[in-house]
């Protein structure tokens, strides 16, 4: 984006405000899912929502997937034991429990729950199970769903807030479990299991031919032991996966049920908002309830009346004058064109620019130290900083407008970027307040 | 300079961008580089503003000075067919397998197999020579999986060599590991000056070192320019010369310096922004120190405001070259 003097065109329709407190307070809200592409602040938002809901009196559990280390420590969930822990120091009557998902542990537990001792051991020790449970694409999403189902069926909490796994695409959360399920339900698995069961007679012939060809080729490629491992694995898992699929399907339906609300988290950046738009469209197609968009890490400025271009011109002005100062030591910048640069100065209350005494090496105030930057240098720096901020604001506004134009129905709440990371309960409270702020304005006109 | 350069890093930090810039930077003075993509996302094609890449080495850019950059997006299914063909002369049977879903199955059920194919195919390009005995590519750069998976990805052939104790697969796996652990290879990590990416970088390096894989450089991406130096920041935070600032702003043509004047009203918000900048600056300095403590060559690439296009990519390449990566 260029240094545009004009502020971005205001939208005719600003998006509706998302009432976060109303959502959290509603006893009908049982599950809140935070989705979005990687690094936008899903985990932070989920934790902040959980904390806010708890401090507004609800009994909440937050399922985080990959919290930043310090954040996890501050909630006391940095140890992976795969069960919710009560977070201390919560204000008010409510309760906050939090946990960090252990994907492998969750998978192992399902195996242990569905298979008897010997069979379970065979599966757990199978090399294919191990690579599947440790990091197959989609396993994390699958296990997040599984854990959500488990937490929900315990009926211990009024509200479950779920974070989603870090992935490039927000859609992975919805698609990956099905992909894993359909893979395990796939044609080939069935062929491997029992070729005779599939297809009619003609099909059988083809499949048998294909089968022997394939096991032959794969056997050569992978070695006989490996192929046997695959076959045992498939055989062992088969009985269980019926159960898996049923569970995954049940959880998926849970996501469609009233009481579930999706929040799409995005940073005001092109890629993140594009992902958010895909997700919004997908939720609609799946009849899944979208509560709104959390626009996280938005930038603002208290001096938005000063455009990037004017700030830069003014900074330039000061720097040039500074050079002149250095050269002849007595230049009076009051004359070197400051007036020419302020044609747009609008405020009626403005005093005329005092020509004298405006030179930057001013010695009043605390006085500039002998060494170090002069006041003019600092001013120029502040103005450049401001120009940078205004350019960022313009870029952000542009991407947001695009989203709003395409999805005017989506309610939005904005969370300003904090200068530092969010890594303790106070930080989460601040985020929570900001999450709730835009809806609150709406509610109390 | 290592002939095979692997670029990893936390998701979204700029692996694809940095890998592409590096491939351009290495293609100086008539050299030829190959840029390899393994995640099937067509990130390279997007970056170079071309149509999706087929599974085929293809020239995508000419570097300043006449060098050439080729690109290859490896499709694991097709790579598996290649392998079957290479080792077993499968012919039409390969296609039948594919139809049946066997290839998909094999690469899905054993994620390791996929990685074997991707690393194997890449190493083949690294080692390939022409008839005159010259390397086909002076350098091969890989846009690799993220830090969390990189050690396992590169180490997969070790597992395979262990599983298949004899035969062509065993030898192939061993040859790949030899290349990966040699001085011909360097694994670079892309980071940002933020807590989580830096943490991942530190963890990733520990893992790579434990697996005896050669760690190369740390590429700090999207570095914002320093607008106010430490001295200036200290001054505005500790003893902000408010009145003098107002006068200075006024002198620069931004309105009156007196109370309520245009310039005076700017002082508070501008100082606030400086305060935020200072906080970020301190945070970034802290992260920079952590990275410096790793004792690896450190490179910084600027944040290109307004998005990254092809021209921006060439700029990053030039910066890398200036910093001596080529
Ligand atoms: N130096 C830079 N200045 C400005 N933008 C940048 C810079 N480097 C990368 N980007 C932008 O950041 C985004 C992420 O970059 P990129 O796709 O290279 O990351 P990645 O690590 O490959 O991501 P993934 O983990 O999704 O593969 C892109 O939009 C890219 O254009
Ligand atoms: N509004 C915000 N202001 C400042 N930092 C933020 C904000 N939201 C998130 N962060 C920081 O950004 C980083 C990534 O956030 P995280 O919630 O882990 O993202 P995700 O779960 O989407 O990958 C963390 O270091 C977090 O502290
Ligand atoms: Mg997260
Ligand atoms: Mg990439």
Image: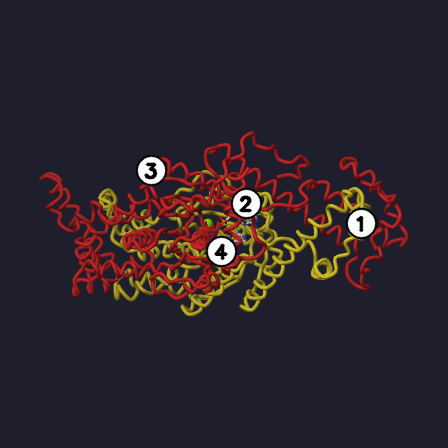
Chain colours: A red, B yellow
Choose the circle earlier in sequence order: 1 or 4: 4
Q: Are marks 3 and 2 on the same chain?
A: no
Q: Are marks 3 and 4 on the same chain?
A: no
State the CA–CA distance, disc 1 to disc 2: 49 Å
Mark 1, residue position? B248
Mark 4, residue position? B139
Q: Residues within 10 Å of mark 2 (few under 14, many from 20)?
A: some
Residue A94, how many percent across, how many down? 41, 56
Residue A286 numbered mark, or none: 3
Mark 2, residue position? B62
State the CA–CA distance, disc 3 to disc 4: 47 Å
Task: Say which residue appears at 86% left-offset and 47% top-offset.
Answer: A333
Q: Which numbered disc, 3 or 2, marks the residue closer to the eye? A: 3
Q: A323 or A96: nearer the eye?
A: A96
State the CA–CA distance, disc 3 to disc 1: 59 Å
Q: Residues within 10 Å of mark 4 (few under 14, many from 20)?
A: many
Q: Residue furthest front?
A: A93
Q: Which numbered disc, 1 or 4, marks the residue closer to the eye? A: 1
On screen, residue A27 above or below A222: above
Q: A18 or A386: nearer the eye?
A: A18
State the CA–CA distance, disc 1 to disc 4: 54 Å
Is there CB contact under 8 Å for labels 3 and 4? no
Q: Residues within 10 Å of mark 3 (few under 14, many from 20)?
A: few
């Amino acid at each position: 984006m260029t240094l545009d003097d004009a502020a971005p065109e205001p939208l005719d329709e600003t998006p509706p405000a998302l009432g976060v407190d109303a959502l959290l307070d509603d006893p009908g809200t049982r599950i809140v899912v935070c989705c979005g592409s990687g690094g936008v602040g899903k985990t932070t938002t989920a934790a902040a929502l959980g904390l806010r809901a708890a401090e507004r009196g609800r009994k909440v559990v937050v399922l985080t997937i990959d919290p930043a280390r310090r954040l996890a420590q501050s909630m006391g969930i940095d140890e992976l034991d795969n069960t919710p822990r009560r977070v201390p120091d919560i204000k008010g009557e409510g309760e906050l429990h939090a946990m960090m998902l252990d994907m492998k542990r969750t998978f192992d537990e399902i195996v242990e729950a569905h298979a008897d001792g010997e069979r379970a051991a065979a599966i757990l020790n199978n090399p294919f199970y191990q690579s599947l449970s440790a990091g197959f694409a989609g396993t994390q999403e699958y296990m997040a769903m599984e854990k959500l189902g488990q937490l929900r069926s315990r009926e211990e909490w009024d509200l479950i807030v779920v974070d989603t796994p870090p992935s490039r695409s927000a859609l992975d959360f919805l698609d990956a479990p099905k992909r894993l399920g359909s893979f395990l339900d796939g044609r080939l698995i069935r062929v491997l299991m029992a070729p005779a069961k599939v297809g009619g007679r003609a099909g059988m012939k083809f499949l048998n031919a294909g089968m022997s060809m394939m096991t032959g080729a794969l056997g050569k490629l992978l070695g006989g032991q490996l192929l046997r491992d695959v076959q045992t694995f498939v055989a062992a898992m088969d009985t269980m996966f019926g159960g898996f699929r049923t569970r995954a399907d049940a959880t998926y339906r849970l996501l469609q049920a009233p009481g579930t609300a999706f929040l799409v988290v995005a940073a005001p950046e092109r890629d993140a908002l594009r992902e958010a738009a895909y997700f919004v469209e997908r939720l609609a197609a799946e009849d899944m309830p979208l509560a709104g968009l959390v626009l996280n890490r938005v930038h603002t400025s208290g001096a938005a009346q000063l455009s990037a271009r004017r700030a830069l011109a003014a900074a330039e002005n000061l720097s040039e004058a500074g050079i002149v100062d250095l050269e002849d030591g007595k230049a009076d910048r009051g004359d070197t064109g400051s007036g020419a640069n302020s044609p747009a100065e609008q405020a009626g209350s403005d005093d005329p620019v005092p020509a004298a005494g405006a030179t930057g090496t001013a010695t009043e105030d605390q006085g500039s130290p002998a060494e170090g930057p002069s006041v003019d240098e600092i001013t120029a720096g502040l103005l450049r900083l401001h120009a940078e901020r205004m350019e960022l604001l313009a870029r952000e506004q542009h991407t947001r407008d695009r989203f709003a134009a395409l999805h005017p129905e989506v309610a939005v709440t904005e969370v300003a970027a904090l200068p530092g990371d969010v890594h303790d309960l106070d930080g989460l409270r601040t985020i929570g307040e900001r999450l709730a702020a835009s809806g609150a304005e709406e509610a109390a006109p | 300079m290592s002939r095979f350069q692997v670029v990893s890093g936390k998701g979204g930090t700029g692996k694809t961008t940095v890998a592409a810039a590096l491939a351009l930077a290495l293609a100086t003075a008539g050299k030829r580089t190959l840029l390899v993509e393994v995640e099937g996302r067509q990130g390279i094609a997007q970056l170079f503003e071309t149509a999706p890449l087929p599974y085929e080495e293809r020239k995508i850019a000419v570097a300043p000075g006449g060098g050439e950059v080729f690109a290859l997006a490896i499709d694991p299914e097709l790579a598996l067919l290649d392998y079957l063909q290479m080792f077993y002369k499968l012919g039409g049977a390969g296609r039948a397998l594919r139809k049946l879903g066997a290839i998909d199955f094999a690469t899905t059920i054993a994620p390791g197999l996929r990685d074997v194919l991707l690393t194997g195919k890449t190493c083949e390009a690294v080692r390939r020579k022409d008839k005159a005995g010259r390397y086909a590519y002076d350098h091969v750069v890989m846009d690799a999986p993220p830090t969390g998976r990189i050690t396992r990805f590169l180490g997969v052939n070790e597992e395979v060599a262990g599983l298949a104790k004899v035969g062509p697969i065993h030898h192939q796996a061993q040859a790949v590991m030899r290349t990966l652990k040699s001085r011909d290879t360097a694994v670079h990590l892309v980071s940002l000056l933020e807590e989580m990416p830096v943490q991942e970088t530190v963890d990733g390096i520990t893992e790579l070192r434990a697996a005896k894989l050669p760690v190369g450089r740390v590429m700090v991406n999207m570095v914002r320019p320093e607008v106010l130096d430490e001295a200036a920041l200290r001054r505005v935070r500790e003893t902000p010369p408010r009145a003098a600032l107002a006068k200075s702003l006024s002198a620069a043509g931004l309105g009156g310096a007196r109370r309520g004047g245009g310039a005076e009203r700017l002082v508070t918000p501008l100082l606030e922004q400086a305060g935020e900048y200072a906080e970020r600056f301190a945070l970034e300095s802290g992260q920079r120190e952590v990275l410096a403590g790793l004792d690896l060559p450190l490179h910084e690439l600027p944040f290109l405001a307004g998005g990254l296009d092809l021209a921006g990519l060439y700029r990053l390449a030039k910066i890398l070259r200036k910093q001596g990566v080529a």
